[in-house]
Image: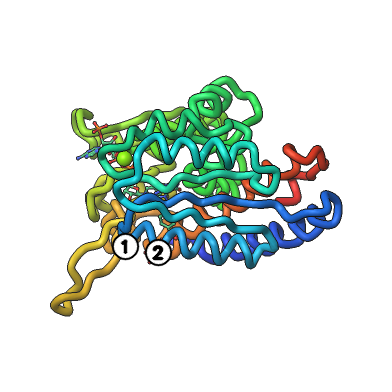
Amino acid sequence: MAEVIDGKAFAEGLRERIAVASTAFTAAAGRPAGLAVVLVGEDPASQVYVRNKGKQTVACGMASFEHKLPADTTEADLLALIAQLNTDPAVDGILVQLPLPAHLNEQTVIAAINPDKDVDGFHVVNVGRLATGMPGFVPCTPLGCVMLLRDRLGSLAGMEAVVIGRSNIVGKPMAQLLLAESCTVTVAHSRTHDLPAVVSRADIVVAAVGRPEMVKGAWLKPGATVIDVGINRVPAAEPGKTRLVGDVDYASASTVAGAITPVPGGVGPMTIAVLLRNTLVAAHRNAGVVLDESAL
Ligand SMILES: NC(=O)C1=CN([C@@H]2O[C@H](COP(=O)(O)OP(=O)(O)OC[C@H]3O[C@@H](n4cnc5c(N)ncnc54)[C@H](OP(=O)(O)O)[C@@H]3O)[C@@H](O)[C@H]2O)C=CC1
Ligand SMILES: Nc1nc(=O)c2c([nH]1)NC[C@@H]1CN(c3ccc(C(=O)N[C@@H](CCC(=O)O)C(=O)O)cc3)C=[N+]21
Ligand SMILES: [Mg+2]
């Protein structure tokens, strides 16, 4: 049976280290690090995530600024809020919760964020920095996945990694990060011919597809390390209830893999912990206070 990669426990440890560094930052800078989260509309899942982010930000000794805007907010009003947050010295990180309502252009909105406050790492400037090996902000979910992989495997150099999914927020930055770790990287997507054959080569499989339990144990190379990014809400056995499942069929995969992240309790908690890490890094850069990033 595969070992379970406990992302929840790893994230708790990371948040403890962040809290220590955050206290030191407040003493050095004379103010806490600050994260502004912008939520447009009333999507229930987004509301839960934003509330959790706010709670964990405060628990780590940082300031949380929540901006909840109505679903019919105009692009001009949203851009005006971002412009204000860009110049607010108490705000080190800005996160605009995605997806946005359909009448708002996500690319336009992300482009308006100051790249040095873009703790999601979604701005084209940060995408370019990641692609060229310059310091910037790396998207939280892929960075959390690499932290789990390095913790489990040590050096990833030379390993065959297959990323399933090519979105701008998960698949593509995940592939860039694994390349920077010197993996041999393959990116699969909906047009890939014979996905099981591609996956069977992989020492490392990262599934970021958004299709419940799609990746089967029979596809895997025995002993592979499996990172399941998927968060899918499906009907539970009990009528009217739902449960969370990943993009990997955990029951079959856990009999073949060497190690696997569960859903929930795997990648999800890492995403929020890395967001807090990115915010603390932003605060140090913005305030000109030196941070030993290796201590995080
Ligand atoms: N744990 C966390 O913190 C986070 C979890 N997620 C979860 O991760 C998953 C992926 O999210 P995201 O990247 O935003 O999703 P997107 O829908 O933006 O991208 C999905 C990708 O999967 C590919 N794909 C779809 N169907 C198949 C298929 N049958 N075979 C192979 N590839 C396929 C698509 O290919 P194509 O490009 O060809 O259409 C696309 O590249 C979701 O479950 C999401 O909820 C997302 C963010 C954070
Ligand atoms: N600008 C922006 N940045 C994001 O990083 C971002 C976003 N928009 N929009 C939505 C996705 C999704 N996402 C998750 C964060 C935490 C969990 C998480 O904590 N999951 C828990 C379970 C949570 C539950 O029970 O629903 C777990 O997997 O254990 C999941 C998913 C961040 N995203
Ligand atoms: Mg999307």
Residue 2 occupies quadrant: bottom left
Q: Secondary structure at mark 1?
A: helix
Inter-mark Cα distance, 1 to 2: 6 Å
Q: Is residue 81 above or below residue 272?
A: above
Rendered position, 77 above or below 90 = above
Residue 48 circle label: 2
Above or below, comparing residue 19 to residue 202 in the picture: below
Q: Residues within 10 Å of mark 1 (few under 14, many from 20)?
A: few
Query: What amino acid type should be assigned to the residue bearing mark 1?
Result: Pro
Residue furthest to the left: 239
In the image, residue 84 lies at what x, y percent? 57, 40
Quarter of the image for the N terminus: give it: bottom left
Q: Nearer the viewer, residue 246 or 24?
A: 24
Note whether residue 223 is visible: no
Q: Residue at x 37, y 29 (%)?
A: 186
| Depth check, front residue: 54 or 73 | 73
The residue lying toward the viewer, choosing from 207 and 124, is: 124
Q: Which residue is mark 1?
A: 44
Disc 2 marks a residue whose amino acid type is Val
Query: Are dots 1 and 2 in contact, CB under 8 Å?
Result: yes
Q: Percent x, y for residue 106? A: 37, 35
Residue at figure coordinates x 27%, y 37% from the top left: 103
